[in-house]
Image (tube, helix red, strand yellow):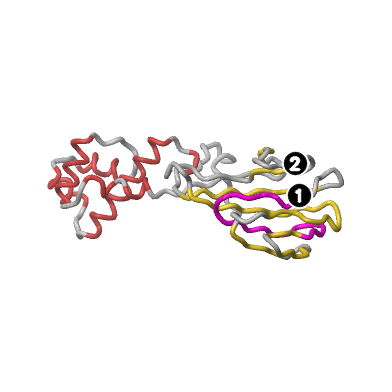
Amino acid sequence: MVRKSAASRGGKPRPDPAHRPPEARLEAAIGRAVRAMRARHALTLDALARRAGLSVGMLSKIENGRTSPSLATIQALADALGVPVTAFLRDYEEQRDAVFVPAGQGLTIERRGTRAGHQYQLLGHGIGKRVAVEPYLITLTADSDVFPVFQHAGQEFIHMLAGEVVYRHGAKTWLLRPGDSLFFDADAPHGPDELRRLPIRFLSVIVYERDDGR
């Protein structure tokens, strides 16, 4: 039997949780935390509602993320469960970011030290993290300069997708072909030393600690 989607049945499709507004995600996170702690204490919905001085209906709405509880209500639930108020926020604070970049739509940028003909497309970025991760799709053509002079903090991983390049790191060089990878400390001079077969495309993932600690 083929099930029809909500849209084809005339109903509204369910929204993607990742696209919910921040306040809705917070409500959902609090609700999940309350439900999990209630289950951990083997309490029924009615029992916890009585402990916290809430109606069963209100507690049900909170657990299902359908209402924004007041600070007083959150404090009452925390007291009833014997946990700090912050325990309800951990799931929200630890939420992981995800960035989707459709094919060909990476942000074209110029990194410090970039020379003519080196195309960098930023494929994603982290938000509010102490450690920064920057994935790039790099394209080199006949118009690209050769210069192994990149030098920056952190570590870098490159993976060849097309073409052939002699890549230098410090005093050593490697001939990289499709499927080859290289992982290195980025504080040593590095970069393409010889463009063997064009066009060249490779992924570069740079990881470093943010100076501002964010």
Range drawn in magenta: 147-166
Q: Position of residue 127 (x, y in %)?
A: 48, 42
Q: Position of residue 43 (x, y in %)?
A: 19, 56
Residue 115: mark in rendering: 2
Above or below for 137 versus 157: above
Name the residue: 46% across, 38% down: 20
User: Does residue 168 appear left or right of residue 73 in this picture?
Assistant: right
Q: Nearer the viewer, residue 61 or 124?
A: 124
- Graded by Cα atoms within 10 Å as few (under 14), some (14 to 19) or many (20 or more), the crowding at tag 1 reads some
Above or below for 48 versus 184: above
- Graded by Cα atoms within 10 Å as few (under 14), some (14 to 19) or many (20 or more), the crowding at tag 2 reads few
Q: Secondary structure at mark 2?
A: loop
What main secondary structure does the magenta stretch of the protein show? Answer: strand
Name the residue: 77% across, 62% down: 178
Q: Position of residue 15 (x, y in %)?
A: 50, 40
Quarter holding residue 160: bottom right
* Amino acid under disc 1: Phe
Name the residue: 65% across, 40% down: 112
Q: Secondary structure at mark 1?
A: loop
Q: Which residue is mark 1?
A: 147
Q: Nearer the viewer, residue 79 or 13?
A: 79
- Is 161 in the magenta? yes
- Is 97 in the magenta? no
